[in-house]
Amino acid sequence: MLCLTSGDFGRFWARLNPMSSTFHPARGIQTTSITQHQEGKTDRSVMKMAAREPLKTGGFRLVYRADFRDDTWADCLALWLRRWGGKQRG
């Protein structure tokens, strides 16, 4: 998620979609998760929850959004390694 919300990904997306980027450039990215929990651990550290909808079958439909930042994939990797690179599961 850190790389998907990076400035590099925003620039990559703009190159893949030149016409849409010309008329309506994307400010960020949105993702939807279907989960049993009220919050998604993968998404919540980088993105903000935009919507939470309980499902009739149980669980939730979660929508997360984030604007693109002005950083690179290398910046994201370095940040991830500083924050979580040394963690181990017990």
Image (tube, grey):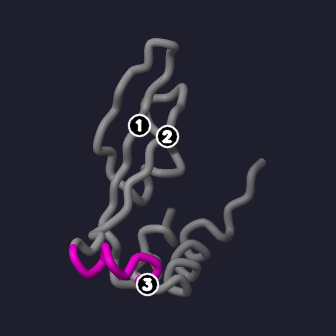
Residue to which mark 1 is pinned: 62
Callout 2 crowding tier (Cα within 10 Å): few <14, some 14–19, many ≥20: some
Quarter of the image holding residue 83?
bottom right
User: Where residue 32 sits: x, y (%)?
Assistant: 44, 43
Q: Residue at x 34, y 32 (%)?
A: 52
User: Label 2 amino acid?
Assistant: Ser
Between the C-alphas of marks 3 and 2, the distance is: 26 Å
Nearest to the eye among marks 3 and 2: give it. Answer: 3
Q: Residue at x 42, y 60 (%)?
A: 46
- Which contiguous range is marked in magenta? 15-23
Residue to which mark 3 is pinned: 15
User: Is the stretch drawn in magenta largely helix, strand or loop?
Assistant: helix
Quarter of the image holding residue 24?
bottom left
Quarter of the image holding residue 88?
bottom right
User: Label 1 amino acid?
Assistant: Leu
The residue lying toward the viewer, choosing from 85 and 32, is: 32
